[in-house]
Image (tube, grey):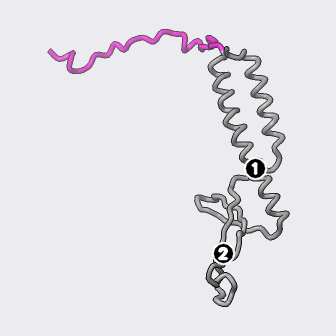
Amino acid sequence: MTDSLQELERRRADLLAQILALGDFRPGSITATQGRCGNPNCHCHKPNEPGHGPNLRLTYKAGGKTVTQSFATPAEQRKAEREVAAFRRYQELSRAFIEINAQICRARPVQDALTPEEKKRRKRSKKRSPTKSMP
């Protein structure tokens, strides 16, 4: 059963309200890195040592390039996690918003809104091609 146009418009308005309520968000991923430092006397260079980490970082694209941002404090990391999670929610809501709009477009009746110029019948050109006019 298809939803009524009024119900679809109500759902679209609800999606817009959810998008407006998101607050701060940004694209990116929180990733963990692990590795060895440059100090050969460090514990990370000993056999069977896992190295330093995991160190969490925010990775995102800016100007076509990948940017990696480290976190100075755990609070900064939690803030970034909330913002990235809100961006994922925005993406979900955006896809749903586009789908609802497509359903509205299909459900909305066509109205005859032709201008007087559009209503005029177009006349066929009386100009003949040069090949047909030559004997």
Q: Which residue is mark 1?
A: 85
SS class, disc 1:
helix
Q: Quadrant of residue 34?
A: bottom right
In front: 119, or 58? 58
In what quadrant of the picture does the N terminus appear?
top right
Q: Give x and y (percent) for residue 53.
A: 71, 72
Residue type at tag 2: Pro
- Residue at figure coordinates x 75%, y 49% from the top left: 85
Taking the magenta stretch, the answer to whether it contains residue 95 is no
Discs 1/2, front: 2
In what quadrant of the picture does the C terminus appear?
top left
Q: Which residue is mark 2?
A: 50
- Residue at far bottom of view: 41
Q: Give x and y (percent) for residue 112.
A: 61, 11
- Residue at figure coordinates x 67%, y 81% from the top left: 44
Q: Give x and y (percent) for residue 38.
A: 64, 84
Crowd rating for badge 1 (residues with CA inside 10 Å; few <14, some 14–19, many 20+): some
Whether 37 is drawn above or below 103: the answer is below
Q: Is residue 45 left or right of residue 127?
A: right
Q: Main secondary structure of the magenta part?
A: loop
Whether 108 is drawn above or below 57: the answer is above
- Residue at far left of view: 135
Residue type at tag 1: Ala
Q: Quadrant of residue 56?
A: bottom right
Taking the magenta stretch, the answer to whether it contains residue 111 is yes
In front: 73, or 48? 48
Q: Which residues lie in the magenta part?
A: 109-135
